[in-house]
Amino acid sequence: MDPCEIPKSTKWDPKTEEELYDLVLKIDNVLDIKTGWPISYPFSEHYEKTAQNPGGILGPFKSLIAPSNEKMNETKQKLLGDLNEGKRKAIVCALGLYNKGKSYVLSRLFGLNLKSSYYQHTEGLSVVSSRSTMSDVLIGLDTKGSQKPVKTPYTIRDSEATERFLQELALHLSDVVLIVVDRLTRDDQSYIKQVKQKYSLIAGKLVSNVIIVHNLSHVRTVEQLDAVILEEVETLFNAKRSENPNCKCPYWTNKDDGTRHVVIAQDENRLDGKPESRAGQISNAPTFSLLKEWIQSIAAIQKESGDLVNSIVESSNKLIKYYIDHPNLKLCRTDDKKSIVISPPLQNETLSYYPNIRFNMVGIIDEVNNTQPSIVKEDNTHYHIYVDCTGYDLNDLAMTIEETNDSKQIKIVSAKPRSFSPNGEEDDKGKTIVHDDFKFNQNKLMEWSYIFPHIVVETSSSKDIDFVHNNGILYIKLTKKSKEEKIRFVKTPK
């Protein structure tokens, strides 16, 4: 990194009055949908309160210098229009594990001073529409961090489900995904991999629009910054520094999948009396300028009209059926636009999650209610699948590989209930004996599936599918397509 020139600081000023989100979808628990998820508009509500009551002994003087009610109402209506009925904007979301600096990154990107500290944390899905020169092209989504601690062990499952739902919702809505990390950990590496896999399975989404922001908030010197870049960005991510002579800010591109990495250091504005950050002076302002350029270029190709709240409802309807065990659950927003509710309302029914629901760090592992436990491993060239098929003969199982969006999905089903003898023997009629421990599962036939993040070579008609059924475990080995084969892959029309 060339320290010869210190760029001018951005207009972002951490000392300005703390600003508010334009919209907050408050989801403390996905199951709260029974009574409705409230939607609030903190920024416009603040305008209304300020207009009605400036407050304090300086109230009369504030009212003299405050914007007119007409001007405030115009601003409020513009912001509400941006979120509800404005033209299509590029949507960028900030994801990351707990307390990695997502709100800080959005604050710098939007030129705002959103809540951003060790002691304050984002709730639900928080939305901001830029009030600067980017106001016509950008909407930002902020989510509460993954792995946030819970108050009691009884709410861990609810917390996991809610975090994963919000992250999947943000991915479905977003055109650009910023994954914010600090000093890299194994959890960060797993999280990044899972976000890219999940995003790649959503129709119309490009993994190249996932950008890793290395928020090195404790790095102050150029020497420290260069050392971390070499160790984590270039070595661990196999990323190469851009050689574009027209780019004033360095960035790095992953050699395998084209994911871009940018680096920021400790804030250059000496927050809380911290020592001067030379690394921040050099890297931060150019990096955020580069991010804005990338996002603006993506926004330029977004031609559709958009209603963000409607998009939230539509995406929630796609996702919630995989979380809540209830047939034909449909969501809508209320006429006053202040809640998302179930339509028609439920009466005395109780909502619950699917009993076998399983999560990774980003969302649901399998988008079906799989009846069988399984393990899916991968290396650079193959997937290795292990499915519990205890009580089934190989002839009882039907396996298919189907095209879905831009990937493939494997399905294994059986029309027979599983059964076996604890002694491996048959009764006098030649039928296997069902062990008492497994009788509870007899009414539900086998169903298991998995969507591959990377396209595989094999098809249902492939005779060279490598599989072994041994000791109740079905092992399947499938081959990943090479980069050249991915380019030639064309989805078959239904």
Image: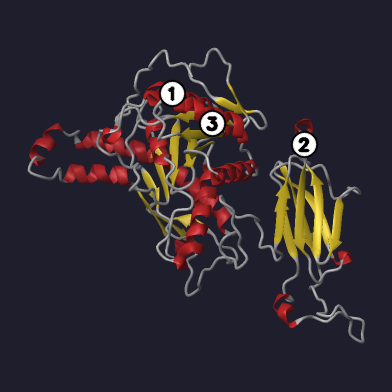
Q: Tell me the CA gap for discs 1 and 3.
A: 38 Å
Disc 2 residue type? Val
Using a 10 Å C-alpha cutoff, classify the residue at mark 1 as few (fewer than 14 neighbours), some (14 to 19) or many (20 or more).
many
- Residue at the extreme bottom: 428
Q: Which label sits in the foreground, 1 or 3?
A: 1
Q: Tell me the CA gap for discs 1 and 2.
A: 47 Å
Using a 10 Å C-alpha cutoff, classify the residue at mark 3 as few (fewer than 14 neighbours), some (14 to 19) or many (20 or more).
some
Q: Which colouring convention does the figure follow?
A: secondary structure
Q: What residue would you read off at disc 2? A: 490
Q: Is residue 344 visible?
A: yes
Q: Which label sits in the foreground, 1 or 2?
A: 1
| Rendered location of residue 206, percent (x, y) | 62, 35
Q: Is residue 251 above or below residue 22?
A: above
| Rendered location of residue 66, percent (x, y) | 17, 34
| Picture disc at residue 302 | 3
In the rendered view, does 467 fall on the left or right side of 232?
right
In the image, 219 versus 269, the foreground residue is 219
Q: Is residue 491 above or below residue 371?
A: above
Q: What residue would you read off at disc 1? A: 222
Q: Are marks 1 and 3 in contact (CB under 8 Å)?
A: no
Going 49% across and 43% down the picture, which residue do you hit? 95
Q: Are marks 2 and 3 in contact (CB under 8 Å)?
A: no
Going 50% across and 73% down the picture, which residue do you hit? 349
